[in-house]
Amino acid sequence: RKRHFSKSFETFIDRKLDDWAAGYGASIDFQKLEFDESFPFAMQVQQSAECSILFGAHGAGLGHMVWMESGAQVIEIGNRMACENYYKSMAQWYGHEYTCFSELQDHNIRHDKNQVYHYLNVTLLLDVLDKAVEPHLP
């Protein structure tokens, strides 16, 4: 498994995402999914099919958008070249809304040569998620 966030940043962003989701209470079902060999493939498909917003770092996990209903939202944290050539095209093919986080002004993504992220504008990420969640609220 490739680590996409440095350990310290992963802890920080996990806490921020948990706090963000708690602010919505029962209005949303927020789950952190790890699409790896420890999570049975059938469960990966089921979780993805029930998902209306999928976001994460550039990687194979975003490919699970194929199981989502058309019109879902996909948010990718990755470099512009990766966004343009891979998951953006895939999202368009399946009829999903797509956002490449690195194309947004003030994204402030910082990563090393191995594409391990050490920083990004978490406030901006939460704003993007708020906009993605808004149409799904009661």
Image (cartoon, rainbow, N blue to C red):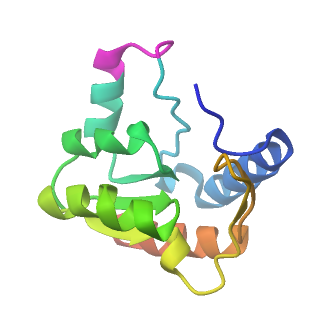
Q: Position of residue 138 (x, y in %)?
A: 38, 65
In the image, is residue 71 above or below residue 130?
A: above
Percent x, y for residue 67? 21, 39
Quarter residue 49 falls in: top left
132 up-or-down from 48: above or below: below
Residue 20, position as x, y percentages in the image: 67, 59
Provide the residue span drawn in magenta: 37-43
Q: Residue shown at 56%/38% (left/top)? A: 32
Residue at horizontal 53%, vertical 81%?
Answer: 104
Residue 138 visible in the picture? no
The residue positioned 32% from the left and 56% from the top of the image is 87
Residue nearer the viewer, 95 or 126: 95
Q: Quadrant of residue 10?
A: top right
Is residue 40 a member of the stretch shown in magenta?
A: yes
Q: Is residue 54 visible?
A: yes
Q: Is residue 114 left or right of residue 72?
A: right
Q: Residue at x 28, y 46 (%)?
A: 65
Residue found farthest to the right: 8
Quarter of the N terminus within the rendering: top right
Any magenta on residue 10? Answer: no
